[in-house]
Image (spheres, helix red, strand yellow):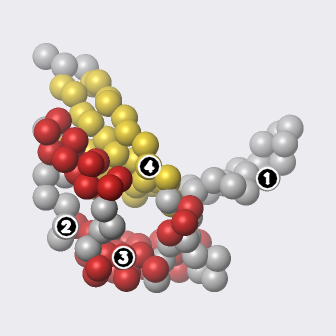
Amino acid sequence: MDRQFHKILLFMKRRADLTPQQFRDYYETRHAPLAERYSRGVSRYIRRYVDPQPHPETGDFTDGPDVITELWFEDEAVFRKTLAYITQNLMPDEIVADERNLFDRASFRIATVMECES
């Protein structure tokens, strides 16, 4: 039987004063553990750090995210409730304060994916 996964994708840029390594280190050692405390119902919490590569025709990749974070859900109801929450409310104060140490919060982009695996 096919399993369905629902995903929320977060495309985020680091603060301009952080190097890519500082950004990754902070995310992994400080922000991810904090975020996990607020992630009930998330089946997988994946951070995919982007290493931009030049395009052969247009040159550098300068406008993309530094990380694509995936929140996976097996339960569609939990997925929908989480999506409604993060698109209509600010996160808890503790999360927002920590995000300011790490991200260019104005750059956040959110998308959803329904993934089918067989």
Q: Label 3 is placed on what type of residue?
A: Val
Q: Label 4 is placed on what type of residue?
A: Ile
Which label number is shown at residue 60?
A: 1
Which residue has dot 3 on it? 96
- In the rendered structure, which disc, 2 or 4, sits on the residue that comes first in sequence? 2
Residue 72 lies left or right of residue 29; in this view the side is: left
State which quarter of the image contains the N terminus.
Answer: top left
Q: Position of residue 79 (x, y in %)?
A: 21, 43
- Going 25% across and 55% down the picture, which residue do you hit? 85
Residue 17 lies left or right of residue 82; in this view the side is: right
Residue 76 lies left or right of residue 66; in this view the side is: left
Work out how far the residue at label 2 is from the one at label 1, CA to CA, in angstroms.
36 Å
Frontmost residue, 64 versus 88: 88
Which residue has dot 2 on it? 38
Work out how far the residue at label 4 is from the one at label 1, CA to CA, in angstroms.
23 Å
Instruction: Indicate the secondary structure of the residue bearing disc 4.
Output: strand
Residue 26: name its quadrant: bottom left
- In the rendered structure, which disc, 3 or 1, sits on the residue that comes first in sequence? 1
Work out how far the residue at label 3 is from the one at label 2, CA to CA, in angstroms.
12 Å
- In the rendered structure, which disc, 4 or 1, sits on the residue that comes first in sequence? 1
Residue 6: name its quadrant: top left
Instruction: Indicate the secondary structure of the residue bearing disc 2.
Output: loop
Residue 32: name its quadrant: bottom left
> How would you rate the neighbour count of disc 2 (Cα within 10 Å): few for under 14, some for 14-19, many for 20 or more?
few
